[in-house]
Image: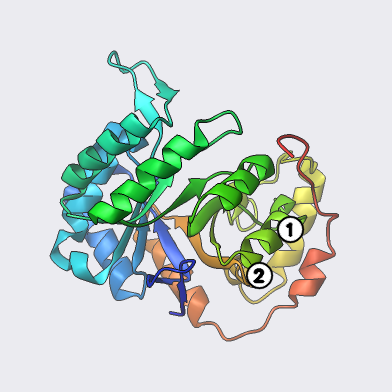
Amino acid sequence: MKQNTLGTSNIEVSEISFGCMSLELQKGQQYVNNLLRKAFDGGINFFDTADLYDQGMNEEMVGTALAPFRDEVFISTKVGNEWREDGSGWDWNPSKEHILNGVNESLRRLQTDHIDLYMLHGGTIDDPIDEAIEAFESLKKQGKIRAYGISSIRPNTIREWIKRSNMDVVMMQYSLLDRRPEEEVLDLLADHDISVITRGTLAKGMLIDKPGEDYLGYTAEQVEKMRKVLKQTDSPIKASIDYVLQHPAVASAVLGIRTEAQLEEILDSRLDSAETDLNQLSNILKPNLYEKHR
């Protein structure tokens, strides 16, 4: 599988990354072990989780599964959402103190001495941005993380982080049904050597097999129109992934994977050499634009 560099770091990640949020942890540790090992054997070396997922259990089980080959993979996790003591939900906390404390808990759960990519799990223009950056830079100097970034779709927030930080990555939603990043953010990040890792690349499965519904300004009928065109390609999954990967800013597409069958379908799609007319796909629907946080 093709690999790409994250920003200006020396981290080379597979163009498909494993989104661990989708793991069905109730199936047990062996299920997680088998699925992540199969993904690694298939060429995926980049695994994304967060301290928020399953109240930390996701990190724990992912850490256990990756431990036997930890030195051969890259782990991304996120910080910024703090669970309430009563478990009723979480609150946003992008403070320096929370980031510095949170990393130690994530390191413990992941059973590792460093995190390859550590991201702020959200972000707004009203955050103490410089304080958060100080925390990430401190963690890099300490060797606890190798690279940092933010998971955000907000152009105003992304621009501020570009101005103030040395981040290597922005994680954002991007797909044939969410082309908002194309307006300015993708080119801006590429100009500053900051990589994008995408989420929502299959638009909740509506680009491949789930019925269309109203989505980010598109009607259900428009979503179905896009899906029908994709069905005419050799591989709707490959076409959907190739579309986001074509932009030079995009290093990897994070895909949520629950089953071996889903994993096999994704891996098989990368072996398909058929070319898709990506320009044709981009002309099916008018690109949507950001309405907020511009």
Between the C-alphas of marks 2 and 1, the distance is 9 Å
Q: Secondary structure at mark 1?
A: helix
Q: Which mark is residue 247?
A: 2
Judged from this view, the residue extending furthest toward the bottom is 273
Q: Is residue 38 visible?
A: yes
Taking the image as shown, residue 268 lies to the left or right of residue 185, namely left
Q: Quadrant of the N terminus?
A: bottom left
Viewer-proximal residue among 102 and 68: 102
Taking the image as shown, residue 232 lies to the left or right of residue 48, namely right
Quarter-wise, where is residue 264 in the image?
bottom left
Q: Quadrant of the C terminus?
A: top right
- Callout 2 touching callout 1 (CB < 8 Å): yes
Q: Is residue 11 above or below residue 223?
A: below
The crowd level at tag 2 (other Cα within 10 Å; few <14, some 14-19, many 20+) is some
Q: Is residue 144 visible?
A: no
Q: Is residue 7 above or below residue 175?
A: below
Amino acid at dot 1: Glu
Q: Secondary structure at mark 2?
A: loop
Viewer-proximal residue among 191 and 216: 191
Residue at 75% x, 56% y is 184
Residue 279 x/y as whole percent: 79, 73
The crowd level at tag 1 (other Cα within 10 Å; few <14, some 14-19, many 20+) is some
Taking the image as shown, residue 91 lies to the left or right of residue 210, namely left
Residue at 86% x, 54% y is 286
Amino acid at dot 2: His
Q: Earlier in the sequence, mark 2 or mark 1?
A: 1
Viewer-proximal residue among 136 and 269: 136
Q: Which residue is mark 1?
A: 182
